Image (tube, rainbow, N blue to C red):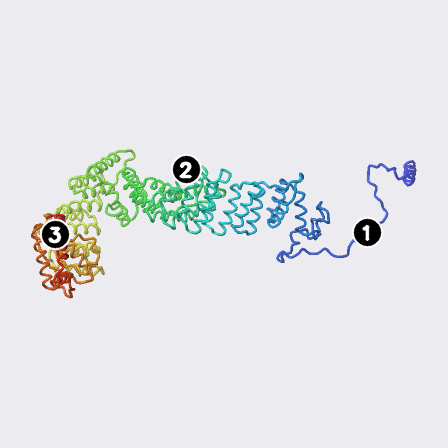
Amino acid sequence: MAIIVKSRTFLSKTLAHNPLLRSISTSPYLSQEPQLAEPPLSTSATPLPPNPSSGSPMYQENWRSPLPNPFLAQSLVPLGFVQQSSSLQIQALSQTLDVASLMDVFADWMTSQQWTDMKQLFEFWIRCLDKNGKPNKPDVHLYNHYLRANLMSGVSPGELLGLVAQMEDYKIKPNTASFNLVLKAMYQERETVAAEKLLERMLQTGEESLPDDKSYDLVIGMLFAVNQIDAALKYMDMTLKCGNMVSMRLFTDCVRSCISAGRLDILVSIVERCKKTDQNKALCPSWNLCNYIADIALQNDQSKLAFHALEFLARWIARGETSKPHVHLSVDEGLVVSALGTAGRSYDSNLLDASWSILRRSLRQKRAPNPESYLGRIYALASVGKLEKAFGTLNEFESTYGNSTKEAEEELFSPFTSLHPLVMACSKNGFESLDSVYFQLENLSRADPPYKSVAALNCVILGCANIWDLDRAYQTFEAISRTFELTPDIHSYNALMCAFGKLKKTFEASRVFEHLLSLGVKPNARSYSILVDAHIINRDQKAALSVIDEMVKAGFIPSKETLKKIRRRCIREFDYESDDRVNDIAKKFNIRMGAENRRQMLFNLEYSTEYPREIKWVVIKVTEWMQLKLLSITPLLLHYSIAVPLPHFHSMLYRSTAPLPICTLTGHDQCSIRGEAEGAEAELGGRGGAGHGIEGMRGTRRAGDGDREGQGRRGGRARREEEQRRRGRGSEREIRRYGF
């Protein structure tokens, strides 16, 4: 232990005299001597950060050690250069840059949006010399940066065009990007005429400056913005022919503009052309815009546009299902019902399939479609002639809503209302299509599982009634219980009564009504209405009124159409007592009958198939009134009078605002008409322009002609006689035109 202490004392003395020697130890040496604390460098407290709402420029910097200019602390640029003014700095910097380094500086300054500095640096650099002592020469890309700096600085389109023209001084050809910058300035100023001219210029120049999708996007968007739809659609057609990509903004503007202008057919063609190209087939408007397109298309029965709108909606639904988290989008069922109606009216099977598919996808098997959707699909399938699918939909409809209340069932499965389109489709080709449907139903009744439907057979019965085929209707009615082993419902009896009534078999129709009452089947309002129609067809208005009385006693209210039919029959049969009873019933139930003047006028017309042998003509004295518009009438000219057929005269009299000197005449051939017309003309001349029942006649030109003849103008008299003979020959041709 003593050896260790002596050795440590020796080492310490040696180290004190020799500072180059250091001791080696495996553990740190801790000095136990007390040491004084160092005084603080500054007595000021650390400041608080600045208020962010004050807009202080120090907020984005290190506020704990703020530097007035961090560029001074880290920049390698000499201090004297930094302390110079901004323009002097840029001028000095321009002398040290080549094309590549200048492009790098522009790229940095574009991110910080130093557009004014970019302009100054380019203008200083273009005046400097390169390392070879030659003036700096920019390329087209560097010059485009200069154009962009001017554009972002708010330079007008005219000044930008001047800068583009200066590119020729540097032997630079402007490319598409150069002209696009000018088009962007024109877009901001809405200078459509200049933009169209510039686009035409780009089309006429070389391949380097041909317009691209950005060029067309700017011009077409500008034209849509100022509502110049025709010009915009022209350039839209050009960009699609060139195979350019259409932006979503431009596509949306095109859709809105075409809809507002009613150019739905053009919009359909644009959408179809976009779908054929790979770069534009993914275009899809927003969800709300798709619904708006569908509404407009369905209002105008534009089936193709409605199909495209539903296709866009299906894309949105698919995107929502694949996104994370899932977004479940659903199409309104009322929109689908309208689409099914449009498909039925336009006979578009593609729209029909798309509507039903998107409805199923929207419901996601959580509930069944509404009855209106089923009925709309049945109507559409019946319209396009797909009867097999229509009856399949009817089967699904019955299985879903067959157990509903009796009142609802009467309306849902009635062949007179809900299923009437299916009835019309069954009877479209007469007994051929009816027999085909009946045999298909008969085969389905033997299938596994069997399909038996009273509603389907009722459609066949009513279809037979529509073609006045009583035998087929009666056989189908009997087959309900015999072949299909079903029970006829009230619609079956109503269809059979309708078949008897159309053939004036009122007694048989009444027997059917009594039979259903004896079986305990409760008749509905349609049963009484059909029985009333049968009596009206048989011209028995009193029996029809008795049925109305029974209908009221049963608790039903007669419809306005039924009362109008009875009143019409009462008027035509001159049964005013029954007419008064009809009016009393209408007043009792507050039914406003209205008038039927147009129908009465058509009823009072006397139709004849014989050609009229005697036509009445009207001679009109030619006066100043002939200045009226008679171009639509081919008159028969006689001297200074005209002879027109009586029907044409009525139209002339209706349009006339002046009195007409007339005289009625009749005739069978040319000579008699000419003779009577000349006699009528003389009669009118003798009366001084007096007509039958028309007052206030004016003086005629013939009286003036007579005065001139009395003055000895024999030459004018000869010319008038020649003109008279010429007009007579023309009149004969006009008479032949009317069949004489």
Of pointers 2 and 1, the one earlier in the residue sequence: 1
Would residue 280 appear left or right of 410 to someone viewing this image?
right
Q: Position of residue 335 (x, y in %)?
A: 36, 47
State the residue in front, 70 or 317: 70
Which SS class for mark 1?
loop
Comparing marks 3 and 1, which lies closer to the viewer?
Answer: 3
Q: Is residue 323 above or below residue 585?
A: above
Residue 68, x across and y down, in percent: 70, 53
Where residue 656 sits, quadrant-wise, is bottom left
Q: Which mark is residue 725?
A: 3
- The local secondary structure at tag 3 comes to helix
Residue at which label 2 appears? 276
Which residue is at the front of the view, 159 or 268?
A: 159
Disc 2 to disc 3, C-alpha distance: 73 Å
* Numbered disc 2: secondary structure: helix
Q: Is residue 249 visible?
A: no
Vertical placement of residue 481 versus 735, above or below: above
**Which label is found at residue 294?**
none
Q: Quadrant of the N terminus?
A: top right
Asked if residue 648 is positioned above or below residue 136 in the image, the reply reads below
Most distant residue in the bottom direction: 696
CB contact under 8 Å: marks 2 and 3:
no
Q: Which residue is found at the position 51% from the left and 44% from the top?
A: 179
Tally of marks: 3
Task: Name the kind of residue labelled 2 in the image.
Answer: Lys
Q: Label 2, label 1: how many angstroms apart (C-alpha)?
A: 82 Å
| Residue linked to disc 1 | 38
User: Is any part of residue 169 visible from this angle?
Assistant: yes
Chain-order first, disc 3 or disc 1: 1
